[in-house]
Image (cartoon, rainbow, N blue to C red):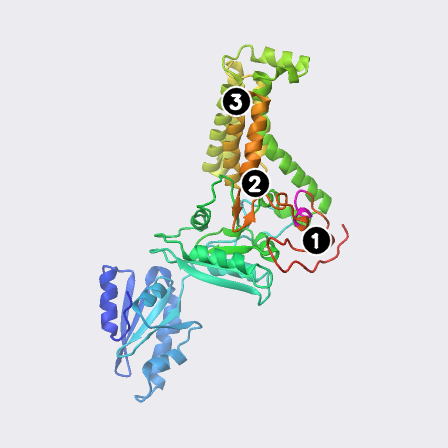
Amino acid sequence: MVMYMLNANDIINKLKQDTNNQEDFIYRKKTLNKKNVYIIYLEPLTSSDKISDFIIRSLTNIEKNMTSKKNLLKEIENNISNFKVKKVVDYKTLCQHLHNGFTIILVDEEPYGLALETKADLARSIDTANAEITIRGPKDAFVEDYQKNMGLIRKRIKSNDLWVETLNIGKYTNTKVSVLYIKSIAKPKLVNNVIKKLQTLEIDGIVNSGTIKNLLVDNVKTIFPTIYTTERPDISTRALLRGKVVILVDNSPYVLLVPSEFNDFFMTPEDSYSKSFNATLIRILKYLAFFIALTAPAIYVSLTTYNQEMLPSELLISFTIQKDSVPFPALVEALIMIVSFEIIREADLRVPGFTGSSLSIVGALILGEAAVNAGIVSPIMIIVVAITALSSLPFTEPEIINALRWWRLVFMLGAALLGIIGVIFAFVLFCIKMASIDLFDVPYLVPFVPTSKEGLKNSIIKLPLKKLTKREKYLSDNVTKEVIHEED
């Protein structure tokens, strides 16, 4: 509802009615130059020191120095001791500013009011990254404060080409959501598609960036993450320099990088501070760990159930002896141990940090040994599950871990039905599904499928920085970039 400010008393009465006259809405009335001046603010969101030192004191000084012929509201606007002053001409805008920590000044018989920023500092200070840890990289991480997060990015990109498009999303939360991109690098089509998608969102409230993430990918049918979530400003900066879009959400310590490829989740913050062959080795290990975590239980089930001829005789005899006292088939045996481990892992994540790790280690050791002694599972199954669990630990993105869980089950069912042939069928299905995913017209498996020459230079194999002279064409039309030559 738009209600133009013609009467300060009507505005205040409506505000009291809409808020049930709650006590944290403060209304103060002063008389200056024979006119009533109303000061309105929301106490939990504002700083009482700023209101007292800048607004109340300024109004007192203005009263002393002005004559009756001067326009009171103009005098306040020009002489108030506040660095951010905005005009408000309707009721809706007034409420928006009020709920964002502004103090409102209304004067009788004036067509507009003033909104003065007096926000209280409710955010925690900038802290170190918790999930994406690096040894030699920067330690700062995003926090819940929008301005601090914006500052962490602008501190790194000192250019007028860093553009920001801001929207307010959520019927009740009215959350500030900003789209950041480098104008001379990012594709206009990508930026416009992201902004249009955000503008179409209709929801009661945005609590954190995860809500935006889920709404952006609601048409993408996959359990793998298609938007990268990060708490690190340096990763966000590198994404902007590649031509990606960064989505910053107020009250969230994580930002979204759009679009994201499968290969992004195998890069680490440490890659930029390592020699190219060391970074390549780490990426190869992560890809190897991914496929071990995905297929190891299925391969064990297929080899012990259908394809025993593929095992050496000595190894087959050893497996047979170990499984002789186990009453369950290999699939059930694997499911028991994998489910048990996942329960321990979830418990480790939810309990306090000072007890979580010790409990999970002791629980896994006791559970594994007790299961073997009770004849529920074989010792080799404990080894297979341990290798599978360890291979999933290099991934910190929860959605990658959850996707591994689901697809591991698909591979195990294929192995239980058709042996190695079933594992191959499951792998073909996996590849087809992955190749069919795209977000904002960027294929998920790029630079592998379709092949991108420039993307391959920084994929599984990371070439030296001096050879990375072009950006990927699927992200930017401005493909040429300046490179600092280094010894590698």
Q: In this view, does 52 lie above or below 131?
A: below
In-front residue for pair 150/194: 194
> Who comes first in sequence, dot 2 or dot 1?
2
Q: Name the residue under label 3.
A: 334
Q: What kind of secondary structure does the magenta stretch mostly adopt? A: loop
**Looking at the picture, which amino acid does disc 1 mark?**
Leu
Q: Nearer the viewer, mark 2 or mark 1?
A: 2
Residue 390 seen = no
Kind of residue at badge 3: Ala
How many dots with numbers?
3
Amino acid of disc 2:
Ala
- The magenta segment is 455-460
> For the residues marked 2 and 3, what is the alpha-carbon distance in whole angstroms?
29 Å
- The local secondary structure at tag 3 comes to helix
Indicate whether residue 459 is drawn in magenta. yes
The residue located at (60%, 12%) in the rendering is 320
Q: Mark 2 points at which residue?
A: 435
Q: Is mark 1 on a helix, strand or loop?
A: loop
Which one is closest to the eye, mark 1 or mark 3? Answer: 1
> What residue is pinned by disc 1?
468
Compared with residue 259, is residue 397 higher up or lower down, i.e. above or below?
Answer: above
Q: Position of residue 166 (x, y in %)?
A: 45, 62
State the image coordinates of residue 301 (x, y, percent, origin top left). Answer: 56, 21
- Which quadrant is the N terminus positioned in? bottom left
The reply to whether callout 1 and callout 3 are in contact (CB within 8 Å) is no
Q: How far apart in space, not on screen, are marks 2 and 1 (Cα)?
A: 26 Å
Query: Residue at position x 64%, y 47% from top?
Result: 270
Q: Is mark 2 on a helix, strand or loop?
A: helix
- Is 28 within the magenta? no
Answer with the quarter of the image where residue 161 lies: bottom right
Q: Is residue 105 rendered to the left or right of residue 306? A: left
- Whole-angstrom CA distance, mark 1 to mark 3, is 44 Å
